[in-house]
Image: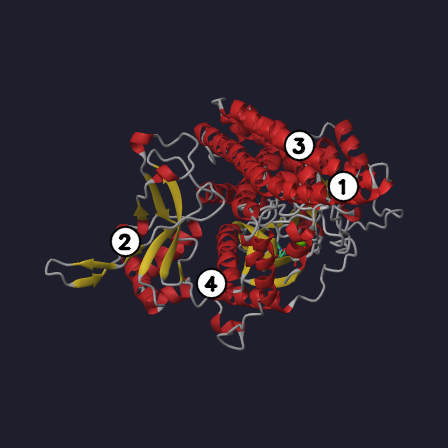
Amino acid sequence: MAKIRFRALEKALRHKPVAVYYPSDKISDYFGINVLDVHKMKKYLSKDAYEQVLLAIETGTRIDRKIADHVASAMKDWAISRGATHYTHWFHPLTEGTAEKHEAFFELAKNNEVFEVFDGKLLAQQEPDASSFPSGGIRNTFEARGYTAWDPSSPAFVIGKTLCIPTIFISYTGESLDYKTPLLKSATVLDKAAVNVCRLFDKNVKKVFATLGWEQEYFLVDEDLYNARPDLILTQRTLMGHSSAKDQQLEDHYFGSIPERVMAYMQDFEIECHKLGIPVRTRHNEVAPNQFECAPIFEEVNLAVDHNQLLMDLMARIAKKHHFVALLHEKPYNGVNGSGKHNNWSMATDTGINLLAPGKNAKSNLQFLTFLVNIVKSVNDYCDLLRASIATAGNEHRLGGNEAPPSIISVFLGTRLTQMLNFIETKLNEKVETDQKTGLKLDIGKIPEILLDNTDRNRTSPFAFTGNRFEFRAVGSSANCASAMITLNTIVANQLVEFKKEIDLLESQNIKREEAILQILQKYISVSKKILFEGNGYSQEWVEEAERRGLPNISAAPEALKAYINEKNISLFVQNKIFSERELEARYEVYVENYAKRIQIESRVLGDLAINHIIPTAVQYQNKLIKNFKGTKSILGKENSIVEHSADGIKLISELIHSIKIKTQEMIEERKQINKIESYSERAMLYSTKIRNFIEEIRNYIDNLEMIVDDEMWPLPKYRELLFVR
Ligand code: ADP
Ligand code: MG
């Protein structure tokens, strides 16, 4: 049996770095070459059509049918010039991946003449059968149709020989079945709410964009080793494997020199990213062996999300060429760090201001503080929803581990800003001009100057201010960033609307604007203080302290997901027109069903491996030991300590084999019971509380066996091989 493992190892060790071909010495020569951006579009369109497209991108206006025909024809001509023969509507269903169904451009005319066809109708809307995508009960069998509709704000692109058109995906009855629809809605409400607040400070602001810069962590594993691990193939994580004697304890991998074979892979996928206009810029090793990270320059949130989805797809495809598999799972290996996807988020105005960058004068600082404090308050009020937005079966392994932010949502601001908020909260009523103690200087009026120390970093906080943006670190590596971004945009938008109302009210009572703003901020700071935490988020003291503060600490994903359907959060989403109640319930259904199914698959795979791979190997080795025992006994006699010792060894193996058998049987029985329950919500809870424990327990027995059984016989590639061969 071990043959498979050794053959895989031999093949893996033979893999050499693959040669990388650069299209040119300068990235700028080929950046975006496969993207139909507005500049390229200009060449193909009339002035009228071009202006309508620009307007649609900027303000979301509808593009009429005639103009859509022009755009379609432009797209077709450009795509064919880039080698495309097919087109597809490209969308993000609720499966964490992307979906596409390719159609050829060609069509036959009456006399069998072949034409390349693509018109406005085909561009604007398609009707894929929605029945194979998760819908949480929205789609019923007799109305399986769904619609995809063109999103002009994200440019079309060519991959291979296919033109991909970013689209939203909705049901026949108009409910969203994807991530993009609510993301676009949330960006729009945030835009409106933030513009209204900006205009308290600057009348020229007309638009506010949410910005996102994601940092994508991942593992690479040799493809042959991967293929020898059914658990990796079927669940993207190892369900067993004793830790390697050496893994990350020497901290010698982080920022270390990138291995040659990995470097070739990174260069290759970066080239493809750049051709597709994805501005990836940073690459480095991560903490765990064979773990890496890449990050782009930030972009407008909708584009950034599309780009991250595209990147994950490219990473997987290009890995094949280099005989690697890119693991995006949050926890592929026990005992070493898992992978996250930090979402760096801010807001920018059309006048070029980053609203989370502290300003140079009192007025812009007051604006900065206004946005900052409103965000803090929104996180305080909706921390349960932010927690839900990142809850998946994979991420459950990470949150609260000793390497990732805890399941408790809190906000880190750094010493300076904390002082500042304390100052506003406590001192504003006093007449202070300079505060000698803290050294905070008062500019005009009452607002101190803000000097930020960028080195003031706290890596243990799930939601940290990092100088000119917030970094939401608890997002999982395989997640669609949209889930977290929809929630963040919505809660902040909602809060800004509230804030504006409060200001209007005070102003109507003849309170001066600055005074009004400070009064409200002061109130917000006092009511949201419990969410602020500057200490070590990984510590047990924080868990206790958070409990005293009444902050939720929910480690099980199915429990966290319930926040989507509580009254407070339903009314938030409904009022802001992001989701209807039905859409939220459907989404919740999709998520809990997905959770239950994932754990079910893990449990099945583990059962199969335990019974059909591990136990037969252990029995074989046990028989070898028994033979040896009999021989030794016949020479040394029964009453000998060496003989007794080998009897103990055999007993230990027998016990482990027995425990694995019993526990696997119990797990299967438990699964049968759970699967009888109709509600996926209940099933998910039970999978989380019951089946996950079985999985861990069985794994422990197997990992103990791994340390005893002859290495020559062990059937699955070991951690030291998976983590260090490259
Ligand atoms: P670090 O590891 O220190 O967090 P990285 O360079 O790995 O830094 O990633 C920082 C990410 O934050 C990048 O993707 C960057 O583009 C992004 N970022 C910087 N400024 C903003 C901003 N205003 N809005 C959104 N993202 C930002
Ligand atoms: Mg970061």
Q: Nearer the viewer, residue 506 or 646?
A: 646
Q: Name the residue under label 4.
A: 276
Residue highlighted by disc 2: 120
Q: Name the residue under label 1.
A: 538
Mark nearer the N terminus (4 vs 3): 4
Q: Is residue 636 above or below residue 155?
A: above
Tell me which corner region of the image, top left, top right, bottom left or bottom right, holds residue 520.
top right
Left or right of 48 on screen, residue 3 = right
Nearer-N-terminus badge (3/1): 1
Q: Outermost residue toward the left? A: 111
Q: Where is residue 594 in the image (x, y as percent from the top left)?
A: 50, 35
Looking at the image, tell me whether mark 1 or mark 4 is earlier in sequence order: 4
For the C terminus, the image quarter is: bottom right
| Residue occupying the point 60% across, 39% down | 610
Q: What element carries label 3?
A: helix
Q: In this view, does 530 lie above or below 334?
A: above
- The amino acid type found where label 2 is placed reads Gly
